[in-house]
Image (cartoon, rainbow, N blue to C red):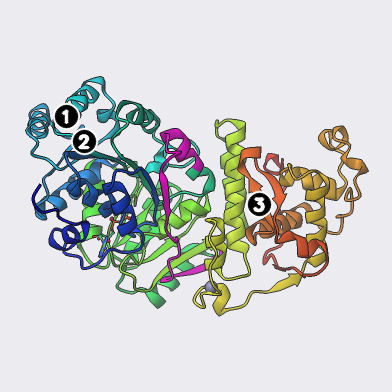
């Protein structure tokens, strides 16, 4: 080694960027020096450089584990353009091409290898890595989209769980896990499942100040979408998310009939059509992609000017990831959503009717509730979102709908005190359904068995109905007075913020439910 090249020089000479952004420099230094890292950065923040540059700085080849076969090829092609010695291995290569890559690895001709987890974890390949390690060394393991290890997330990949053995088998090779989706429980799961207890955590701010949030009450969703597009995005590229494939097809056809350059994307389309539509969205200007959540992971188009949701997403972290595809160039972009109580009911029913285990359903319902809390929030939406990710937002954003048009609210101080004190008196371990039973004075078997008929809060809440209490609890959760304890199957706990309310030192104003809440008591209530 005569001259050492610094990470900064590589950033400039290879990638052509003058400076690191955010946590990049710290992560790169840490991993280049041999440390393990957990990197949480919002979509578009620049996670790739965090492993690419250390791989170029360190001896041997860096192994990047990525679940996205379709994108691997593009990423590798882009890096090759920059002159990086890189290749990929996945099921899209034929035997001959795969052998060629293995030969390059053996000869020490590669600095980076992108590989699908199922390929990496074969015995043959692990043995091959043993030899490489002994020979020229392994620079690092980078586990991209690390949230795929979470069984409760929407991108669960069972193969990811096997990656834990990398640590045991290659204890000297630094490992990093990277993701844009990680609330606290997911983060814990990543650490645990990948054995990253010793890793340094780099958690970037998830604030995206250039995203302007708006939630509108659903009346006629299509017309509302059209008005929004006409008024604000006549020639812009954007994504419209729908829940079902059928609705994607119908909405895309309808937008097309209205003169928009709209394309559908969902997992039910054949691979060629999906690829073509994705390429058109990336390369052409002003395409509106109407899609299910199957579209978007890894999409790097800087000038997506809006993300619109015609249906409710499943969780706030899912939502944040979906809207994170807008405004990657840093210019203003809209995150627009229509939301109606009908959606809530059908989403609840869908979650409950699936065959997931009971505890998982409870967690999913709580996640849905956090999202509803966001929808119903009366305060700055940046604040609500960031609080969910465990971050404080300084002041109001001044750009979201709640900042621009103050919301119709009611003084809910007394009900809030009742709701909070009911949480306290029942021992801070129950979910909303039970708490409401107590407030309404319902003598269910559970209430009776626990002796909760004896509590001072039993039956004190008859002035509100079940739906109104749900709304109170959702909003109290959304504004941080209550915390959902995912580990305790979604029991609610008081936070510090609840104390001044319980002591009568602070009043609580909640959003008035705009529609009368009509909902039959169903399984969804329990
Ligand atoms: P992520 O994986 O976090 O979603 P990427 O790694 O794909 O984000 O990076 C997003 C975009 O930002 C890419 O176009 C990338 O080239 C660019 N980028 C990353 N780091 C920098 C930097 N330090 N300076 C300028 N552009 C950067
Ligand atoms: Zn705001």
Q: CA distance from mark 2 to mark 3?
A: 43 Å
Q: Position of residue 157 (x, y in %)?
A: 39, 34
Q: Which residue is mark 2?
A: 138
Where in the figure is residue 430, as x and y percent of width and height? 74, 42
**Which badge, 1 or 2, is on the more N-terminal residue?**
1
Dot 1: few (<14), some (14–19), or many (≥20) neighbours within 10 Å?
some
Q: Is residue 130 left or right of residue 268?
A: left
229 is higher (above) or lower (below) than 502: below
The location of residue 252, given as percent across then percent down, is 35, 57
Residue 377 got which mark? none
Query: In this picture, which residue range is highlighted in magenta?
Result: 188-217
Identify the residue position indicated by label 1 in the image. Answer: 132
* Mark 3 element type: strand
Going from N to C along the chain, the mark reached first, 2 or 3, is 2
Residue at left 20%, top 30%? 133
Question: Horizontal placement of 148 versus 119: left or right?
Answer: right
Q: Is the residue under label 2 in contact with that under label 1 (CB below 8 Å)?
A: yes
Q: Among all residues in the image, which is located at the extreme front?
A: 2
Please state if 472 lies on the left or on the right of 53 as rendered: right
Q: Quadrant of ligand 1?
A: bottom left
Badge nearest the viewer, 2 or 3: 2
Residue 280 showing in the rendered view: yes
For label 3, the residue is: 483
Quadrant including the C terminus: top right
Q: Residue at x 21, y 46 (%)?
A: 55
1 or 3: tag closer to the N-terminus? 1
Q: Is residue 194 magenta?
A: yes
Relative depth, front residue between 376 and 482: 482
Q: Estimate the spatial distance between the alpha carbons at disc 1 and disc 3, rounded to whole Å.
A: 48 Å
The answer to which of 79 and 111 lies nearer the viewer is 111
């Amino acid at each position: 080694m005569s001259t050492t090249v610094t990470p900064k020089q590589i950033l400039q000479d290879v990638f052509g960027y003058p400076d690191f952004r955010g946590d990049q420099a710290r992560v790169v230094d840490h991993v280049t020096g041999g440390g393990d890292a957990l990197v949480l950065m919002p979509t578009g923040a620049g996670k790739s450089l965090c492993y690419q540059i250390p791989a170029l700085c360190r001896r041997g080849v860096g192994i990047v584990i990525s679940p996205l076969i379709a994108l691997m090829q593009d990423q590798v092609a882009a890096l090759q353009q920059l002159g990086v010695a890189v290749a990929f291995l996945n099921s899209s290569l034929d035997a001959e091409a795969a052998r060629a890559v293995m030969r390059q690895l053996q000869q020490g001709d590669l600095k980076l290898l992108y590989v699908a987890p199922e390929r990496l974890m074969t015995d043959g390949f692990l043995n091959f890595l043993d030899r490489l390690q002994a020979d020229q060394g392994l620079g690092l393991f980078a586990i991209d989209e690390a949230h795929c290890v979470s069984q409760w997330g929407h991108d669960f990949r069972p193969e990811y769980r096997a990656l834990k053995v990398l640590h045991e088998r290659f204890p000297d090779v630094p490992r990093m896990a990277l993701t844009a989706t990680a609330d606290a429980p997911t983060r814990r799961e990543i650490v645990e499942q990948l054995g990253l207890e010793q890793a340094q955590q780099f958690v970037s701010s998830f604030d995206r100040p250039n995203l302007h949030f708006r939630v509108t009450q659903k009346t006629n969703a299509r017309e509302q979408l059209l008005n929004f597009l006409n008024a604000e995005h006549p020639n812009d590229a954007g994504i419209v998310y729908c829940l079902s494939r059928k609705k994607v097809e119908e909405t895309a056809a309808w937008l097309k009939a209205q003169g928009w350059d709209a394309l559908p994307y969902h997992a039910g389309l054949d691979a060629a059509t999906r690829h073509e539509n994705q390429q058109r969205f990336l390369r052409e200007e002003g395409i509106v992609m109407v899609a299910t959540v199957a579209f978007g992971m890894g999409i790097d188009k800087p000038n997506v000017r809006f993300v619109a949701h015609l249906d409710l997403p499943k969780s706030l972290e899912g939502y944040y990831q979906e809207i994170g595809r807008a405004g990657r160039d840093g210019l203003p972009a809209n995150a627009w959503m229509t939301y109606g109580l009908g959606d809530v009911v059908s989403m609840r029913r869908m979650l409950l009717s699936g065959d997931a285990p009971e505890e998982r359903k409870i967690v999913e319902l709580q996640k849905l509730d956090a999202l509803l809390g966001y929808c119903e929030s009366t305060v700055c939406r940046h604040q609500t979102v960031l609080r969910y990710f465990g971050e404080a937002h300084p002041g109001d954003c001044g750009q979201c709908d709640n900042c621009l048009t103050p919301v119709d609210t009611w003084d809910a101080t007394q009900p809030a005190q009742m709701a909070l004190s009911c949480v306290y008196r029942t021992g801070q371990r129950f979910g909303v359904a039970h708490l409401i039973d107590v407030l309404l004075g319902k003598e269910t078997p559970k209430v009776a068995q626990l002796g909760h008929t004896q509590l001072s809060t039993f039956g004190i809440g008859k002035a509100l109905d079940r739906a109104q209490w749900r709304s109170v609890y959702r909003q109290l959760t959304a504004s941080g007075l209550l915390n959902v304890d995912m580990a305790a199957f979604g029991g609610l706990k008081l936070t510090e913020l609840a104390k001044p309310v319980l002591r009568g030192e602070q009043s609580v104003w909640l959003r008035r439910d705009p529609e009368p809440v009509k909902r039959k008591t169903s399984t969804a209530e329990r």
